[in-house]
Image: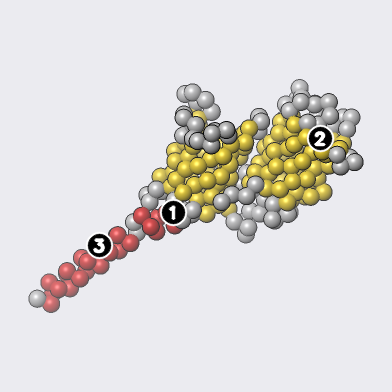
């Protein structure tokens, strides 16, 4: 009788243990702030996974677009993301990305560069302790006297790579730039296309996501650059 009671209690303990590893704890294990470690070498994703599994954030494509993203992570770690229309703020059909989060700080999956053009992406969980600068930034492009003349958008991924674009500089149209940020927050980027006007931008990024001492220059003009990282919530 005692042996049977012990077996029943052991079985009950096993059921509770398996149940305890279910939906609630799995979602919590994947919660946190994520930045793309790779996303087609021209894009930066910055996302927040809440303990409930809800996902929100931004996707910057360096050719001139910044999108809101929404999605979810299931109890088993299945990740679903979609781009929101900037006008209707509703998910855009055909933009769904899927993946899997491992609970240890990494999510991998598949998305599309176009119809029948799938590619793999990797998201890495970040924190102020291991990455203070990653995210999506919006900056004001100003002349040397401080007069605003344009806008710059850029993203910094989990590898410290910069991808972005600038609009409104004198004598230029939209310019695409790429570059790097150092471990101390020194950011530099230059024109991506050789046929585009040569543009250089630089600045110091602080741990709270502020761009200071920013500057830009072309072959004929120069000016100031200041901005902040977009918050995610």
Image spot of residue 171 (x, y percent): 83, 26
Q: Nearer the viewer, residue 67 or 75?
A: 67
**Mark whose residue sits in front, 1 or 3:** 1
Element under label 3? helix
Note whether 199 is above or below 214 in the view shown. above
Counting every numbered tag in the picture gives: 3
Q: Pointer 2: what residue?
A: 149
Residue 233 can be seen, yes or no: yes
Q: Which SS class for mark 2? A: strand
| Image point (39%, 59%), residue name | 25
Circle nearer the N terminus (1, 3): 3
Marks 2 and 3, how far apart at CA: 64 Å
Q: Say whether residue 161 is visible.
A: no
Q: Which residue is mark 1?
A: 52
Q: CA distance from mark 2 to mark 1?
A: 42 Å
Callout 1: SS: loop
Question: For residue 21, what is the image quadrant?
Answer: bottom left
Q: Quadrant of residue 172?
A: top right
What residue is shown with label 3? 15
């Amino acid at each position: 009788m005692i042996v049977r009671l012990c077996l029943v209690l052991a079985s009950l303990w096993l059921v509770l243990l398996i149940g305890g590893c279910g939906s609630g704890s799995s979602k919590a294990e994947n919660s946190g702030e994520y930045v793309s470690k790779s996303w087609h070498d021209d894009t930066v994703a910055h996302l927040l996974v809440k303990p409930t599994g809800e996902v929100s954030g931004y996707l910057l494509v360096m050719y001139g677009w910044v999108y809101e993203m929404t999605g979810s992570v299931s109890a088993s770690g299945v990740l679903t993301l979609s781009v929101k229309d900037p006008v209707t703020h509703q998910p855009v059909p055909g933009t769904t990305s899927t993946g899997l989060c491992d609970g240890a700080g990494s999510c991998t999956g598949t998305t599309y560069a176009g119809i029948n053009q799938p590619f793999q992406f990797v998201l890495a969980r970040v924190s102020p302790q291991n990455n203070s600068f990653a995210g999506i930034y919006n900056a004001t492009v100003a002349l040397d006297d401080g007069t605003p003349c344009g806008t710059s958008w850029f993203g910094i991924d989990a590898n410290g790579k910069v991808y972005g674009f600038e609009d409104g500089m004198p004598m230029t149209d939209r310019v695409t730039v790429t570059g790097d940020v150092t471990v101390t927050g020194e950011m530099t980027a230059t024109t991506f296309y050789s046929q585009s006007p040569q543009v250089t931008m630089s600045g110091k990024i602080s741990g709270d996501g502020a761009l200071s001492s920013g500057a830009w220059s072309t072959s004929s003009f120069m000016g100031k650059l200041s901005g902040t990282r977009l918050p995610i919530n």
